[in-house]
Amino acid sequence: IQAGPGFFQSFRSKGKTLIILTSILVGSASLIAVIAKYILDIDTPSVVGLISGALTSTPGLAVAIDTTNSPAASIAYGIAYPFGVIGVILFIKLLPKMMRIDIQKEAQLVEEQRRDMHPKLSTASFRVSNANVFGKSLAQLNVRSMTGAVVSRVKSGNKTIIPVASTVLLEGDLIKAVGNEQSLEQLAILMGERVDIDLPLGTTQELQSLLLTNKEIINNTLGFLNLQGTFGCTVTRVRRSGIDLSPEPNLVLKFGDKLMVAGERESVKQLGHFIGNDEKRLSDTDFFPIAAGIVLGILFGKLSLSFSDSFSFSFGLTGGILMVALILSAIGKTGPIVWTMSGAGNQLLRQLGLLLFLAEVGTSAGVNLVSTFQESGLALFGVGIAVTLLPMIIATLVGHFIFKINILDLIGTLAGGMTSTPGLAAADSMSDSSAPSVAYATVYPIAMVILILFIQLIANVVY
């Protein structure tokens, strides 16, 4: 559920680069494990368990157990897992030093690039002195489309108003607008001159941040909702995940967005009721979508594709639920059903599910743990080290020298491709940049899907 939007967005924004790099990580790990199988005569359940453990993937282990129905997968997972955690952390920590890269300078460069993608929004005041706009309305001037700025206030004479599309500009009027620096410069050219004058709100007006928690209106654009025409309020910016977004008419609103709104006090209050503005709803969890998603996932996982008499492929129980969750969370909403979860509910479900799953894995695998480790534990541990380290080395060489990925995106991609949350923590601790977390969130769902496909393939084809 958490990874779905990032999974499909990664195809649109990052495209081939991340798909190739993630495929290299998971594919090389799988290839190394399969080669080790034939050299050291390791059974197939142990091979898929090693891959899951070396890549610290609990969903991968679930698929391995579901596909092989053997406790050997759990035992191999337990042997490979410790170095899978430690190895990724050490590799990420040491990588900048080995490559002689100043990670703080890289962080500054990435931050500059991020600002270029999402320019900082600010406010400015202007005096209407261009004769070409005298007597024309904001709609006639098409200010929003021409400049990219949002006019939030107009002072004509001694009266300050919240403008609407029909508001007419007169000579000498003062206006206040919100936008990035480029859009404000364009507005200055259109209006006449930029002035250093503050335009306070009138006594009956207010500027307020409203929280979008009404699930009935999410996934709609600002233009479709027409908040200015309906409530007479102007949305000056939309804050999402710590980033201020320009309120374009085609901006699709998401659950939890914060809308900065200017308008008459009573109108702002009515708008607040319309969009929800209830922080308690952020932590509410509706279990019907979860139950429906699980049922659909089980049904999807039972679908089987037969390629020949000897080989058929299906996602299985875990893979089916994962794929359905990815698709439904990306859709976001179907009629009255919202396919999202609150952060608190998501975390609770993840922790509870992980606790129950690992308890079952431990009790079923513990019977054969000692005998398996005595027989081939050292060999499995060695293969686990190779499956953890070699793919990261290969991906680093390809990512740095061929794709020219900066070090922050690279370490985030390594952590995500290895499905390592501790690796992400190590990457985040190295700088104040959010780039590793963004790369991790983009790559992680791709890695999960590819890993499940490889485990299914190996379990069904490799003997």
Image (spheres, rainbow, N blue to C red):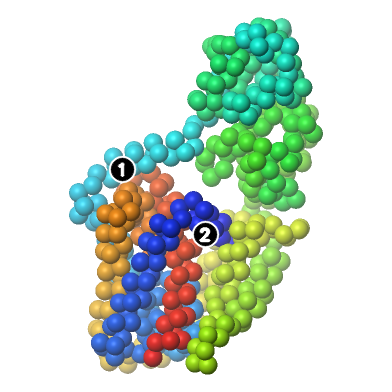
Nearer the observer, 459 or 349:
459
**347 is higher (above) or lower (below) than 250:** below
Sequence-first tag of 2 and 1: 2
Q: Can residue 214 be seen in this snapshot?
A: no
Q: Is residue 63 above or below residue 448?
A: below
- 97 left or right of 234? left
- Say which quadrant the N terminus sits in: bottom right
Quadrant in the picture for the C terminus: bottom left
Q: At 77% across and 41% down in the image, what residue appears?
A: 274
Residue with the mark numbered 1: 106
- Res. 388 visible in picture: yes
CA neighbours of label 1 inside 10 A, class few (<14), some (14 to 19), many (20+): some
Of residues 168 and 59, the one drawn nearer to the viewer in this rendering: 168
Q: Position of residue 324 (x, y in %)?
A: 61, 69
Q: Residue at x 24, y 56 (%)?
A: 94
Residue 185 vs residue 339, the one in the foreground = 185
Residue 7 numbered mark, or none: 2
Residue at mark 2 to residue at mark 1: CA–CA distance = 26 Å
- At label 2, counting other C-alpha atoms closer than 10 Å, the crowd grade (few under 14, some 14-19, many 20 or more) is many
Residue name at image x 40 percent, y 66 percent: 23
Element at badge 2? helix
Seen from the viewer's position, the closer of residues 237 and 130 is: 130
Image spot of residue 90 (x, y percent): 27, 61
Label 1 SS = helix
* Three-letter residue code for mark 2: Phe
**Quadrant housing residue 134:** top right
Q: Amino acid at mark 1?
A: Glu
Q: Residue 113: which quarter of the image?
A: top left
Position above or below: 385 against 202: below
Residue drawn at 45 percent across, 89 percent down:
70
